[in-house]
Image (spheres, rainbow, N blue to C red):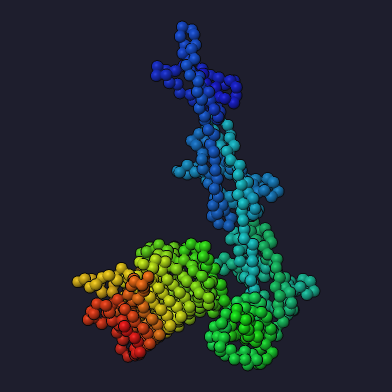
Amino acid sequence: MYAVWTEDRSQDDLKWYVADKRLNYNVDLSKAHRAYGFYNIHTYLSDKGKMLGLNATKFEVKKPKVTMTVVKKNDNEYQVKLSGLTSDISFVDTPIWTEHKQQDDIVWQGTKKEANGLYITTIQLSKHNYESGKYNVHAYGHSKITGKYEGLLASSHVVKQLPVTSTVTKSHNDYTVTLSNVPSYLQAVKVPIWSMRDGQDDIVWYVANKQANGSYVTTFNLSKHKSNIGDYAIHAYGQTNTGKMSGLLATSYKVADLEVKHPAKYKQHQTVEIQGYATHESNGYYLVPHQNWIGTVKAVNKNVNNAVGGWEYHIIYDNGQQNVHVLEQDIRFVYHVNLKATNNRTQNNQALQSAFDYAKAHRDVTLYLPKGDYVIGSSISESQLSPHNKSEYVTLASNTKLRGNDKGTNLVVDGTMLWFGLPTGQNGTDGVSNLTLDNLHVRAKDERNGNYFMVMLNHGNNILVQRSSFTMVQKQSRHIFDLGGVQNATFKNNKFVGYAPELTHVNSIPPGIDLHKFYAEAIQLDYANNHGGWDAGMIRRIAPQAYQVHNRNTVLSNNISILYNQFLPFYKDGRLVAYSSTVGQHSSQVGNVTILGNRFEKTLSSRYHHGSWIMKPIHYMSAGGKRAIVRDNVII
C-alpha cells in the first residue's frame, strides 16, 4: 500500500492507495490532492493485519515557470509571447495595464496557443490611451491539477517612444517644418505656429502632410505672421482615431533678419580643410601653399574686406601656422572617421560605412582617418555578397574625399575587404562621382600569403586616387581597382606592392592554364554591361535592380590617366615574397588612356617571356577613334 500526501499541508490530504499486482497505482492529481509542490510517498506491506514500512520517498509537481518576451510589431502593437507553460494549464488570461494612474486602464485579454507551445497576446496602446512607459503584464491560467485559476506571471515591459523632433528649412520667406519620429498610429497632425512678438495674435494652425518616410511636413510664410522676424513658437499635436489630441512637440525657431543671406556654415572648434582650388584670403593673402591643409576654426567673422561678402574664418593648424581671413567658399568640413585600434574588423568596417553614409547626406566633405593601424575586412566570399550583409563590405559616396591622417594611417586587411561604387544611371558618368582617395595606406595582415582588397566602380566620374599604397592585397586573378565603364579617373603617385604570392615559385606556365592568373591587372580598365562576369556578378548581388537597369548599354572606361605610380614586388626579411602586377584591360576595348611615367619592377607576367600581348606590364586595346598616350614608363 502507498500513503501519499502533500508536504506543505501536513497530512490533511493523506490518502491510501492499494497497489496492483505489479505494485503500481496511478494517482489522478486533479481528483486527489490538487496541489503543486512536494509529495510524500510511504510504502507499506500489509501482512496478517500488520503494516510493515518498506520505503519513504518524495517527488515534486512543479508549477509552471513562465517567462515573457515582448516584440514590437508597430507603433501601436507589441506582441507578448509566454513560454514555459505546461500541459496541465488549459487556458491563459493576461491582465495588462499601465503604471500611470494605477489600474485605471486595465484590460483582461485572452491568449492564443501556438503549435510550438507558446501563448500569444498583444498589447495595444490604443486600449491604454496610447501611453508610453511601464506596462504591467500578469498571467493567470486554469490548472488541471489544482482546479484553480493560478497566478503564473507578474512582469512588465517599458514602451519607449522616440521624442518627436523638428527641422526647419528656409526658402526665401517660406519656412518648411519637418516633424520626425511621429507615431504611425496618429490619424492627423496639426501644427500651430506664431511669432513670439505680441503674444499669439498671429497664431495659425497648419495641417501637416504625411510623407512616404513617415515624417510630417508643413510650410509657413512670414506674410501670414505680419512678416515678423525673431523667435517663432512651433507646437505640434497628434490626433488619434478616437479624435483625441495629444501634444507632440513644443519648440521654437529664430527667423533671422531678411537682410542676412545665411548663417555661417562652420562653427568655432570644427575641423576644416582648405579647398584645393583656394588661391587667396579675403585680404589678398596668398593661400595656394596651404591648399589641402587641415586645421581648426578659431573664430568666425563677417567678411568686410571685399565685395564677396559672406563669412570668413580664422583657421589654425597643428604646425602653429594660421590663416585669419579664409572665405567660406574655400573650405570644406572634415568628418573624423571613428576607427579604433580596439575595434574588431567588423566594427571598423561599420565605422567606414558610417562615414560614407554621412558623406552621402553631406556634400563635399572630407572623411579624415585617425593616426595609427586599424584592422578592416571580413570572411565573406564573393558569392556571399548581398544587400543584407553590409557590415562585410563598403559602398562609396560621391562628392567625397577619404583621406589618411597626415601623421600616418594604415588600413590592415584581415581576410577580404571590398569597396563598391554602384551605378545610378545608364551613362558612364552615372555612378560614384567626384571621389578622392588620398594618402591611404592599405596593407595585408598576412604579409606572407596576402589578403584581398578591391575597389570596384560600376560607372562613375571624376575619380582621383593619389599618394596611396596597397601592399600584398591583390589576390590571384583579382584587381585592386576594377573600373567598369568609369569616366575621367586619375591614379597618381601611388604604390602597388606584391601580387599573388602563391605564384612566386611557379617557374613556368602550365599548359592550358588561365593566363589571367599571371597577368591580372592592379588597375583594370574594364567595360560595363548587364551580362558581365565575376566582377559584374558582385555588383549584381548587392544591387541587383541597379545593375540590371543601369547597365543595359555597354560603356567603355574612358579618359583614364595612370601617372607616376610604382608597381613593385614585395620583399620580407630580404626574401622575395611576391612579384608585382600590371595595368590595362585584356577582354575589351578601352577609351582614351594616358599611362605616363610609371615604374614596373619584376611584374609576374614578364617573368615568363610569354609572347601574348596580354602578358605585358601595360596591355590594352584602344577603341576606334580613341587615343592612347603611353610613354616614359620604366619596366625592369
Q: Is residue 161 visible?
A: yes
**Image quarter for residue 444?**
bottom left
Q: Residue furthest left?
A: 511
Residue in view at x 51 percent, y 43 percent: 83
Picture coordinates of residue 252, whole percent (x, y) = 71, 70
Q: With respect to residue 127, does 630 lie above or below?
A: below
Q: Is residue 30 left or right of residue 608?
A: right
Q: Is residue 412 left or right of residue 313?
A: left
**Image quarter for residue 94?**
top right
Q: Is residue 357 visible?
A: no
Instruction: Give whichever of 282, 125 is nearer the camera.
Output: 282
Q: Is residue 93 left or right of residue 621?
A: right
Q: With respect to residue 75, does 338 lie above or below?
A: below
Q: Is residue 31 left or right of residue 617?
A: right
Picture coordinates of residue 538, whole percent (x, y) = 37, 69
Residue in view at x 42 percent, y 19 percent: 23
Q: Residue furthest top?
A: 48
Instruction: Give whichever of 98, 436 is nearer the camera.
Output: 436
Residue in view at x 53 percent, y 85 percent: 276
Q: Residue furthest right?
A: 198
